[in-house]
Image (cartoon, helix red, strand yellow):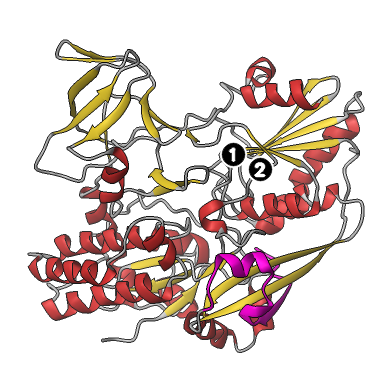
Amino acid sequence: MKKTIIFLLIAFGLNNSTCQVSNSKKNSPLLIELTNQQKVEDVKFMFEFIKGKSPFRDILEREFGLTDLIKLEENYINRAIGSKSNKEFILLLGELIQILGQGNCHTSILSPQTLFEQFEPSGDTSRLIAKLGISKRAIELGDHWIARLDQSSKNWRSDLSVSYKNGYYITDKGLTVNGRTIEKGSVITSIDGLKPLDYVKSIQHILPFRWDTKLKIPFSSTGSPFSVNADDTKDHWDVEFLTPKSNRAKLSLEKKKGVKNTMNYPYLNKTILCKKLREDLAYIKVYGFPDTVSIKNDRKIISDFFENTKEDYENLIIDFRGHGGGNTVYGECLFVKPFLDKNYTYTQYAVVNKEMFDSSIRRYQTLDNFKKSFARVIDFGDIQKIEFDELPDSFRRNNSPNDDYYYFKTTRNIVPDNNYNFKGKVFLLIDNNCYSASETIIRLHQQLGLSTIIGVNSGGGAGAVHVPLIYEVPNCHLLFRTEIEMTFNANGTANELYGTKPDINLEPSVYPTSFPKSFKTDDLLKDSWIDWVIKNRL
């Protein structure tokens, strides 16, 4: 097997999307048909991650039900040998990357376009290859593979509006099909002959999961089990319901191509929005953390808001809902350091695969060089290897020692900087779509006591000692990134799975959760979460 090149992802905030595909027919010569041996090697390469290198194997087995990984590998090897073309085979690899990504938010297939945008905006292929150490074939074939994956997308939808609530999938609206009506509030009891939870688990090779931290079960990332099509031989789902009047009902639900947006967050054409909601209440909406070049300008927007207002606000709501991450340094400069009244020590614990960590650090020669390379994006602080027995009791109770992994403690001194003219109470609104860099800021707020955190468990993905790595599958040259570290919460649970638990949990076991109709003042005041803060905390 060819040696696969490993290189580092410089920013947590790389776009996961692979929908923007350039025309690659002229510049991306097709790969000759892979041999069965090459296909088997690529499948085994992926299972090296799933079974051993990924710190999330226990989550895949214990929480998501992939208990027989040996049998699963045999199944994919047989499917690979039976695949009739490269196109059919690449779909299998897409499934394995999806499985690898269950339980962590940073796993995704990457396009050359994304790499050029992040690492070599000039578009010079030779410089990109030299900078990242990837093969020329990975660049040549990247858009071709992504086009094939997009053409065979399993993303489908139905006309039935469904949300996830307390372990059930429940209709949000009524639906009439061929004279048969399913009422609003009906509970789905069966999908294609399976209980909903069993059905969702059966399609985890194409359906991303979220984690119900209350019931400790996985559920569809969109809140609906009808967002992917696992069976191309059928044009419908056979669905059974229990209506609000306890009647049984059945429906053949038509499968339709395309993605249905289940999170209708109001549009905001800026990163930062500052508003006065009441005489005693200010509001800041944050949609993302851009690059550090935006720090000075965006910090001034917030500073000017507090300096120029006539009100002496006693309360501030910072709204992180729908925040997908970005640059952690930006987040700290705007939403942590300006709210500090003294120096604080911030501590994190994490576990990283030894082989992957050592190979990464060797590329930078020293750990200090590694940290300096990412200082523009994230400050790792003092990174210290420790023994399993040196972990806090809560960590050891929830985890078992493993000789294949390093255990780390990171420590940082966080100091006040450019404080805002605000001395009141801060309320931070978070939801399950907060992850990556925003998760780090949420954890800082919780550990340093900067705010009362309100909402639901966040999506996880905080960085402690490393960034996601990018890998090249050896024979087909598909590029993907994945996590090599698992950061712990204070109680020893995996941050990627459980996220951060809010101080006040408003909608546990619900997805999608509440959000305002728009960012007009009246609509913000009508938002159920903001209304809760006003009625219960002001």
Residue 10 visible to the viewer = no
Q: Which mark is residue 502?
A: 2
Q: Give the secondary structure at mark 2.
A: loop
Magenta region: 377-401
In percent of the image, x 12 and y 34: which residue is there? 235
Name the residue tied to disc 1. Answer: 456
* The N terminus: image quadrant: bottom left
Residue 2 in the image, given as x and y percentages of width and height? 29, 86
In the image: residue 414, left or right of residue 530: right
Residue 368 lies left or right of residue 359; in this view the side is right
Crowd tier of the residue under label 1, counting other residues whose Cα lies within 10 Å: few below 14, some 14–19, many 20 or above: many
Return the residue nearer the eye: 372 or 213: 213
Measured from the top left, where is residue 350 in percent x and y?
Answer: 61, 70
Classify mark 1: helix, strand or loop: loop
Residue nearest the viewer, comparing 228 with 421: 228
Which residue is farthest top? 179
- Which residue: 18% across, 23% down? 251
User: CA gap, disc 1 to disc 2?
Assistant: 6 Å
Decide: few, some or many residues near mark 2? Use Cα within 10 Å; few <14, some 14-19, many ≥20.
many
- Does 189 sit left or right of 210 as displayed? left
Residue 261 vs residue 230: left or right? right
Above or below 344: residue 44: below
Asked whether disc 1 touches disc 2, contact meaning CB atoms under 8 Å apart, the reply is: yes
Instruction: Determine if the magenta segment contains residue 210.
Output: no
The earlier-in-sequence mark between 1 and 2 is 1
